[in-house]
Amino acid sequence: MRLSRLLVLSAAGGTLAQSLLDILTAQSATLSTLTAWLTSQQLVYDILSNARGITLLAPSNTALTQLYTTPLVGQLALDPNLLTAFLSYHVLDGVYLASDFVNTPAAAVPTFMNMKAYSNVSGGQVIETRSQNGAVTFYSGNGVQSNFEKYDYNYVGGTLHIIDTALSIPSSLTDTLVAGGLTAAVGAIRRAAVETPLNMATDVTIFAPNNDAFDAIGSLVNNMTLEQLTKVLNYHVIPGKVLYSQLVPGDGSEVTAEGGSLNFKIQNGSLFVNSARVVAADVLIGNGVVHVLDGVLNPDNPTAVPDPNAATQEPAFNGASSTAGGVPFTSAVITTTSTATVPASSGASEPSVVPAAAPRRMAAVGAAGLLGGVVALVNWCV
Ligand SMILES: *[C@@H]1O[C@H](CO)[C@@H](O)[C@H](O)[C@H]1NC(C)=O
Ligand SMILES: *[C@@H]1O[C@H](CO)[C@@H](O)[C@H](O)[C@H]1NC(C)=O
Ligand SMILES: *[C@@H]1O[C@H](CO)[C@@H](O)[C@H](O)[C@H]1NC(C)=O
């Protein structure tokens, strides 16, 4: 389902005459920081002031103040392009009133962030929205969630909503997987030397097995040749398409980079890919979307079907088992979440992988942000 795009607002008389500046000024108690950031980029501010048919998701002062505890603000200060990208990510292409979001269960809404350095999603990077019981949540990079503080400030260019958490620019596939603790998938991608092509591609859908999934077939994946591993990994990639959850065919199939097809089924409130369950959906990345699986997909077993009533599924690789050697492929992958577990006194070294636009709360909620994100365990949206 798509959100309606209202190009003409039917607001009460008088409100249409308001400019963006009028709104920002009237709401200065909440939006003075954003106003300062916007006016520091005169070109962006001018474009925004003159734009028509847009929705501005305006982070509150509290939301932007929270960013000052992260490396992002320093990066924004040094890099005007990043600041432009950050600001344009908060501008939606179309006028969406709060009621449009409330009335749409799930949607990927295009933004104006379309600079190649920050987005390889055709038509511009999106935010994913979810509406449940009248509450709307916006999901951005690394599963960061934002909610309305206030909404429907209509003005001549469209409408403005105040949000409680700044949107996070989606980072690369591998940075996102590392942040989410999906280190086996990252290690496998690096072992097979497909990291660069995957990060450089335009428009991809990636099904990323979690660490338990790789662990369950440790006896087998550890012994795969590079060719075999690459074949398995390519079976997890749908090239040239960004299939957000609401676009995944509920009962259908899609062709993978490996050449074989994946079969989708919604059963018992979960989405299954062959026999693997999607345990977290719609994790946005710089060039598409990731859905996290509880099993590794087997290109030689495309007819594997799930037992929808079982909490966990048999691996799609017959006879494979866990090994004593630990989770496969993880030993060389350094995680950004280590700060949460390493004692402060240990002098833990700086994480070696820092997402380009480190979202706030990365250290605290890395995995939780992903796995507690747009979760699809029950009531899968179609
Ligand atoms: C987009 O792709 C180009 C290569 O075509 C790459 O240099 C750039 O880093 C990519 N950006 C993102 C956000 O993936
Ligand atoms: C698989 O690799 C393990 C070491 O990880 C080795 O002990 C085992 O013999 C190998 N099995 C096969 C079937 O090659
Ligand atoms: C769905 O699966 C759960 C176990 O994950 C099970 O307890 C429940 O009975 C199932 N529901 C239906 C409708 O099959």
Image: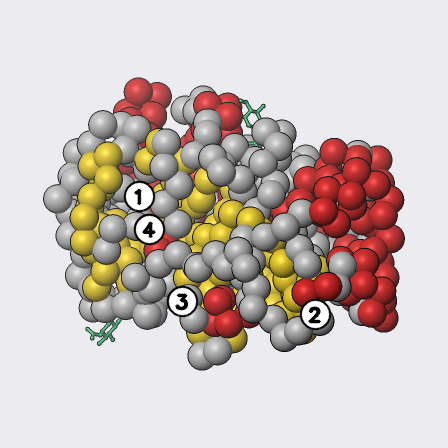
Q: Are marks 1 and 2 in contact (CB under 8 Å)?
A: no
Q: Earlier in the sequence, mark 2 or mark 3?
A: 2
Instruction: Look at the image and tell me in which quarter the N terminus lies.
Output: bottom left
Tell me the amino acid under the disc marked 1: Val
Disc 1 marks which residue? 296
Crowding near the residue tagged with mark 1, few <14, some 14–19, many ≥20 C-alpha atoms within 10 Å: many
Q: Which residue occupies 53% across, 56% down? A: 7
Q: Point out the image quarter for the C terminus.
A: bottom left
The answer to which of marks 1 and 3 sits earlier in the sequence is: 3
Q: Which residue is mark 4?
A: 247
Identify the amino acid type marked 3.
Pro
Mark 3 vs mark 4, CA separation in Å: 13 Å
- Reading the image, the residue beneath label 3 is 105
Residue plotted at (70% across, 70% down): 15
Residue 291 seen from this side: yes
| Marked residue nearer the N-terminal end (4 or 2) | 2
- Residue 222 appears in view: no
Estimate the spatial distance between the alpha carbons at disc 4 and disc 2, rounded to whole Å.
36 Å
- Callout 2: SS: helix
Badge 4 amino acid: Leu
Marks 4 & 2, CB-CB < 8 Å contact: no
The mark that comes first in sequence, 1 or 2, is 2
Q: Dot 2, how many residues are within 10 Å of its Cα: few (below 14), some (14-19), or many (20+)?
A: few
Q: Position of residue 110 (x, y in %)?
A: 51, 47
Q: Amino acid at mark 2?
A: Thr
Q: Which residue is mark 2?
A: 15
* Label 4: few (<14), some (14–19) or many (≥20) C-alpha neighbours in 10 Å: some
Instruction: Answer with the quarter of the image where residue 262 lies.
Output: top left
* Above or below 114: residue 247: below
